Amino acid sequence: MQRGDKAEIMEAATLRQGIDDLCAAYADCIDDDRLEEWPDFFVENCRYLITSRESHAAGLRHGIIYCASRGMLQDRVMALRRANIFEAHRYRHIIGPARVDRVEGGVAEARSNFLAVRIMHDGDSQLFATGRYLDKIDISSHPFRFVERTVVLDSQKIDTLLVIPL
Amino acid sequence: MQRGDKAEIMEAATLRQGIDDLCAAYADCIDDDRLEEWPDFFVENCRYLITSRESHAAGLRHGIIYCASRGMLQDRVMALRRANIFEAHRYRHIIGPARVDRVEGGVAEARSNFLAVRIMHDGDSQLFATGRYLDKIDISSHPFRFVERTVVLDSQKIDTLLVIPL
Amino acid sequence: MQRGDKAEIMEAATLRQGIDDLCAAYADCIDDDRLEEWPDFFVENCRYLITSRESHAAGLRHGIIYCASRGMLQDRVMALRRANIFEAHRYRHIIGPARVDRVEGGVAEARSNFLAVRIMHDGDSQLFATGRYLDKIDISSHPFRFVERTVVLDSQKIDTLLVIPL
C-alpha cells in the first residue's frame, strides 16, 4: 500500500465499511429471528458451508451444514420453521472488524471473527460458538451479497446443537 | 446508495467512525469505573433505558433501569457510590461495529451489539449480558452525545444483578 | 475536532482502519497458531507486556510476561514450541474497534478491548481472558508495527494458564 495514494486507501476504507455493514445486517437478521430474509443475503448461485477448523484445514468441501444455492437456504429455513424449534433459543453474534484480503472481478474476499452466545427461552445464556467467516462477496451491485460464506467453527463439539444458521 | 457519490459514502464512513468512537468511550468510562463521567455522554434532556427483548418487543417504555434526564443519571451514580458496591465487580464490554440506520435533523439513529463480561473482585469472570444498543445520537456538535440510549438485553434473567449501568 | 476539516477526519478514519487491520492480523496470527510470525508484528526494539489491571494501575512495568526486544519474543516462541504444548489449545480473539488517542512523531497511541476464548483439544470452549490492549504503533512505514503492546488483563486469576501470547 502506497501512502501517497490517498484515494485508494479511502476507497478501501469505504469498502470495508460496506462489508462490515453486510456482516452486521446478516447477524441481525438471524439474531432477530427474521430467518425468512436470510437467503436474500446470498446471490442465487451461492454456497453456504458450516464446517470445523479440522475439516477446513483438511480441504474438505462439505461440512455440518451445506447449501449450494439460495433455494437450498430457503428449504432449510422452511424445514426449521416446520420443526417448530425456532422459539427455543436465540443467538447474539459479536463480530470483529472485517479484513479484506483481495478484490477481483467485482468479488471481494474477506474474513472476520465471530462469537455467538446462545440465549435459551428461560434466559440462560452461554458461549455457544466461536470461529471465522471466510467470505466471497459480490460487490458489483448494491446491496452486497455473499457468493460464498464458509463458517469455520473453532470447536468440533457443536454439531448436534446446530439448528439455526450461524 | 449510489456508487458514484463517493463523497457521501465517505461522509457516512466518518460518521460511523465517530459513533464507534462514542460507543467505545462510553464503554471505557464504565469499564474503568469512572462512573461520575458517565452522565456527560448524554444530552441534558435524555432518556436511558435498560429493558429486555420481550418488553421492548411489546412496546413497553419502562424497564429495569429508566432515567429521563441527565440529573437522574447523576442521581443513579451517587446512589451507587453510596451503596458502596462499586468495588465488588467490573465489566468489560466488547462492542461490535455500529450501524447507522438514519440521520435527520442532526440526530443519527444507530445500533450496535454488545457483550459484557463481569469480573468479580476475586478474579472470576463470567459472561454477564448480551444485547443491543439502540441509540439516538446528537451529531450536531462535538463531542457527540446520546439523546436516547436503549439497552435491549437478550435475557430477562439479569435484573437482580444489575447495579452498574451497561 | 473541527467539522470543517474533512480531510483530517478522513485521514483519521484511514489511520484507524490501518490499526484495526494490524490488530486483526496480529490476532489471526496467534489464533492460527502461526506463532513464528508473531515477533514480526513488533519493531526490533520493542516492549511486550502482559499484566493485570491492578499491577498496571500501580504503575508496575513488569508483569506476567515481559519481553523487551523482538529477540525475546522469538525466544519465547521457541521455548513454547519445544515444550510441545502448543497443540493443546487455541484461542479465538474478538477485538473491538481501536481508538486512537494520539499521534506524534510517526507513533500512534491506540487502545482496544479484547476477549479471548480458549478452545481445548477436545473441543471445550471457555471464556479465557478479557482486557485491553494499550499500544504504541510505528505508523511511519508499512506494514505498521508495535513499538509497545501492553496487554492489561481484567482478572488476576489467569497467570498459571497463560502460555500462548495474547
Image (spheres, coloured by chain):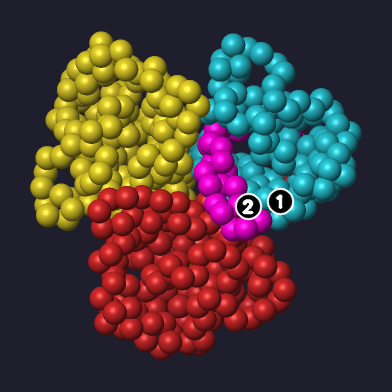
Chain colours: A red, B yellow, C cyan
Q: Find the distance from the CA under tag 2 to the CA under tag 1.
A: 6 Å
Identify the residue at horizontal 67%, vertical 31% (top origin): C160
Residue nearer the viewer, A86 or B67:
A86
Mark 2 secondary-structure assignment: strand
Circle 2 is placed at which residue position? C120
- Which numbered marker is on residue C88? 1
User: Image check: A101 left or right of B125?
Assistant: right
Q: How many marks?
A: 2
Chain label for disc 2: C
Going by the numbered disc 1, the residue's amino acid type is Ala
Q: Is residue B7 left or right of residue C65?
A: left
- Residue A85 — which label? none
Quarter residue C7 falls in: top right
In this view, B132 is above or below B163 = below
Please report contact status of discs 2 and 1: CB closer than 8 Å, yes or no: yes
What residue is at 47 percent from the left and 74 percent from the top? A145
Q: Is residue B81 left or right of residue C151?
A: left
As drawn, the residue found furthest toward the front would be: C122
Residue C29 visible from this viewpoint: no
Magenta-tinted stretch:
C113-138
